[in-house]
């Protein structure tokens, strides 16, 4: 399967230009939007929790995120993963990350409002993706299937560190939001999310690129996107995804609760 590189945007472009690009492509990709030190602080917090659970190679630098030899993949829904994830969701620096002014400013431009009027969904989401666990890879879907609420909701995906395609970043179907909402009739047992949209690959126009530290991807709630599998030998992919909408627009009550309702 081939992927075209992301079309790159500039955060200092006028709001109307960014909205026009979003209307055309369904996504905006920014290089080095978030300061690298801010990203690395959250990466450190996440990897420290992984290390406490014994997932990381004690002979490697913690920030590499190298999996301990012999460690079997774990993931969402499994007790050991959820134990770590509950702690991550309660980590202040992780919870505060999506409210960085630079992210809210982009969201405000897309929503045509002031930054103070942007609602960052309280449901913060993080992902720690193991290698050798291709079956758990998130299938092609639209976030609106899970979010509901306001159609004018934008997701923001940020890997916590460099994320080449081999490590399992995101791919988006260019312009797919223009199809409107699509019923998620595909069921993929074991995959994160588990439900997806049927894809005619002969028509799909997939875009993706290697992410570097601080790169950010915004996309519309109707944009079809998917994760790429983590095909590395021994590295964790650590990422966050969060959502933004107008504070006065409708919101699904579940979006106000912690992810997986982990209190």
Image (cartoon, helix red, strand yellow):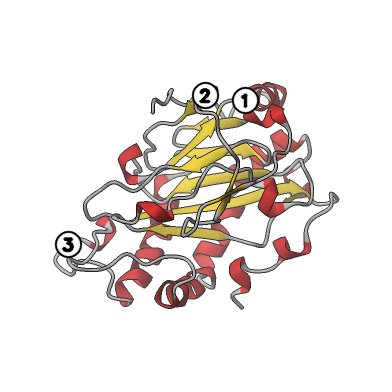
Q: Which residue is mark 3?
A: 60
Q: Give whichever of discs 3 and 2 has the lower sequence position.
A: 3
Secondary element at tag 1: loop
Q: Give whichever of discs 2 and 1 has the lower sequence position.
A: 1
In front: 250, or 192?
Answer: 192
Secondary element at tag 3: loop
The quarter of the picture where the C terminus appears is bottom right
Left or right of residue 154, residue 56 in this image: left
Q: Position of residue 54 (x, y in %)?
A: 27, 75
| Mark identifier at residue 16 | none
Q: Which residue is mark 1?
A: 175
Q: Where is 62 relative to 10, above or below? A: below
Q: CA distance from mark 3 to mark 2?
A: 39 Å
The quarter of the picture where the N terminus appears is top left
Q: CA distance from mark 2 to mark 1?
A: 8 Å
Residue at coordinates 62% horizontally, 45% vertically from top-left? 155
Q: Position of residue 15 (x, y in %)?
A: 70, 27
Foreground mark, 3 or 2, reads 2
Left or right of residue 108, residue 188 in this image: left
| Mark identifier at residue 205 | 2
Residue at coordinates 45% horizontally, 38% vertically from top-left? 215
């Amino acid at each position: 399967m081939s992927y075209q590189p992301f079309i790159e945007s500039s955060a200092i472009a006028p709001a109307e230009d960014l909205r026009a690009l979003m209307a055309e492509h369904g996504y905006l990709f920014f290089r080095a939007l978030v300061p690298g030190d801010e990203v690395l602080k959250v990466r450190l917090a996440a990897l420290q929790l992984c290390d406490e659970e014994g997932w990381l190679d004690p002979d490697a630098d913690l920030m590499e995120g190298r999996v301990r030899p012999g460690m079997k993949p774990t993931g969402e829904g499994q007790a050991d993963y959820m134990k770590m994830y509950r702690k991550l969701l309660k980590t202040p620096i992780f919870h505060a990350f999506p409210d960085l002014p630079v992210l809210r400013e982009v969201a405000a431009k897309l929503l045509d409002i002031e930054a103070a009027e942007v609602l960052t969904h309280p449901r913060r989401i993080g992902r720690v993706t193991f290698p050798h666990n291709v079956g758990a890879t998130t299938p092609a879907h639209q976030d609106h299937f899970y979010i509901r609420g306001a159609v004018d909701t934008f997701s923001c995906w940020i890997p916590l560190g460099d994320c080449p395609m081999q490590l399992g970043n995101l791919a988006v179907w260019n312009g797919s939001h223009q199809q409107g909402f699509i019923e998620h009739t595909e069921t993929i047992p074991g995959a994160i999310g588990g439900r997806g949209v049927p894809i005619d690959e002969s028509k799909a126009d997939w875009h993706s690129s290697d992410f570097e530290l601080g790169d950010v991807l915004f996309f519309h709630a109707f944009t079809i996107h998917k994760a790429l599998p983590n095909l590395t030998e021994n590295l964790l992919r650590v990422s966050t995804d969060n959502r933004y909408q107008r504070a006065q627009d409708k919101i699904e009550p579940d979006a106000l609760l912690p992810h997986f309702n982990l209190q």
